[in-house]
Image (cartoon, rainbow, N blue to C red):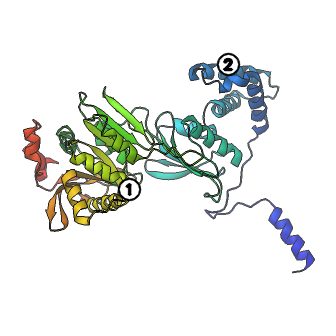
Amino acid sequence: MSLADRLDTARRSQAPPQATTSGTTARRRVRDPFADLKGRVHENLIDRLGPRLYDPHLPESELAAQVRSTLQEVMDREETPLSVADRTRIAQEVSDEILGHGPLEPLLRDTEITEIMVNGADSIYIERQGKIHPVEARFTNEAHLRRVIDKIVGRIGRRIDEASPLVDARLPDGSRVNAVIAPVALDGAMLTIRKFSADPFTDRDLIAFGTFSPGVRDFLRACVIGRRNIVISGGTGSGKTTTLNVLSSYLPGDERIITIEDAAELQLHQDHVVRLESRPSNIEGRGEISIRDLVRNALRMRPDRIVVGEVRDGAALDMLQAMNTGHDGSITTVHANSPRDSLARLETMVLMAGVELPVRAIREQVVGALDLIVQQARLKDGSRRIVQITEVVGMEGDVVTLQDLFTFDWGAGRDEAGRYRGQLVSTGIRPKFAQDLVDLGVDLPTTLFTFSSQ
């Protein structure tokens, strides 16, 4: 290559990237005309409030009032001519930066958004009504995004750095947060926020969404009250935690309930609830408290019910042991594509506990522990539905036998908007544990298991 060619290549490599239609190319940044003004206001605000911004003893409501009052004074001193709308927008954005999570704050306030996905400082997507859309919000740069991530993670006493580039955290409202930074994330820090409603969804909401029907709601409530052990199975984002929250709301208020989660999300309103949360290791690699540790410890805490947010490792063995040793009525979730797959995953996770058990012994543990598998899915129309409710019946030889009690009616087709018309319908089979429910004083209407009932 000639000297002229090399110089031309160098000039082109230093030129700003051009916008293209490729999904992997960063989109052209549109400069905010008020960026300099917001920077000045931000700096003046920090200079005036100083240490009060970081005072852990200052109530959040009082800090917010001081920030807004001082912000108004700083804005009044600015000589830049601004319209009322621009002044309001700048004040809101600076306030979001100081008190909240910067450009994510408007997205967090939007109740219709269920997920926020940050793929680097320049690229933010949201999920609305089950569909993913890009948004115009941006972070100023990578450092700005990292500051927001550090703020979220630091609030619950966790850390993220090159030594620990992955972290699970939560927002004050219970929304689940996952962050990934370099060297694992190659194109800049990644942040995913799965939002949870400040007012948790009730069974009426799930009926309105089409997740299940009133008849299925009555059946699941009877199973929870009747101390059946339930696994909620499904893929990522299928609504397992929401359904777990609703089923947990049926737990009797006079029982001692222990919840065990990676990041606390469940919102139970019973009086006697003990909440436990796992903890990652510290910078020296010590101090980890795993889900398995918490399940084992919960057995010493005199629980009536144990609710595990998700089993994903050797904790499955301890969970099955708990279900088999007098802690009936426990509920958990697992990632799996079908009820049969959920049993296979449980077997695999039991083997991850490091205990040498023959497969048949594991399957006998599973059959003795589980009563019901609720399969959930996110359909192509964006809706989240329960598509199968399956009873764990027993074993034939070395095979666990299952029977479907309710299945989704795929044959109903879709409406004009592309939404599935189908719902759960009974297969006409009564569960084998129906008499056990009756013995506990929980009645199941006979019409619940006829084809016309749904």
Question: Based on the displayed image, in which of its 4 quarters is residue 86 positioned?
Answer: top right
Relative to 301, say whether 374 is above or below: below
Mark 2 neighbour density, 10 Å: few (under 14) some (14–19) many (20 or more)? few
Contact flag, marks 1 and 2 (Cβ < 8 Å)? no
Q: Is residue 92 left or right of residue 360?
A: right
Q: Is residue 384 above or below residue 77?
A: below
Q: Amino acid at mark 1?
A: Gly
Count every numbered label the image shows and give the total: 2
Q: Position of residue 331 (x, y in %)?
A: 28, 44
* Quadrant in the picture for residue 437: top left
The residue positioned 88% from the left and 76% from the top of the image is 5
- Residue 405 in the image, given as x and y percentages of width and height: 17, 54
- Res 210 seen here: no
Whether residue 116 is visible: yes
Q: At which x and y percent is residue 90?
A: 69, 32
Distance between the alpha carbons at the discs numbered 1 and 2? 46 Å
Q: Please tell me which residue is depicted at 26% across the width and 65% down the height of the picture.
A: 358
Identify the disc placed on residue 40.
none
Residue to which mark 1 is pinned: 235
Describe the element under mark 2 as helix, strand or loop.
Answer: helix
Q: Which mark is residue 69?
A: 2
Q: Residue at x 51, y 43 (%)?
A: 287
Say if 334 sits above or below 100 in the image.
below
Query: 364 or 370, which lies in front?
Result: 364
Sooner in the amino-acid sequence: mark 1 or mark 2: 2
Camera-side mark, 1 or 2: 1
Residue appearing at x 57%, y 37% in the figure: 106
**Residue 160 position within the rendered picture, expressed as x and y whole percent measured from the top left:** 60, 46
Give the residue type at disc 2: Ser
Secondary structure category for the residue under label 1? loop
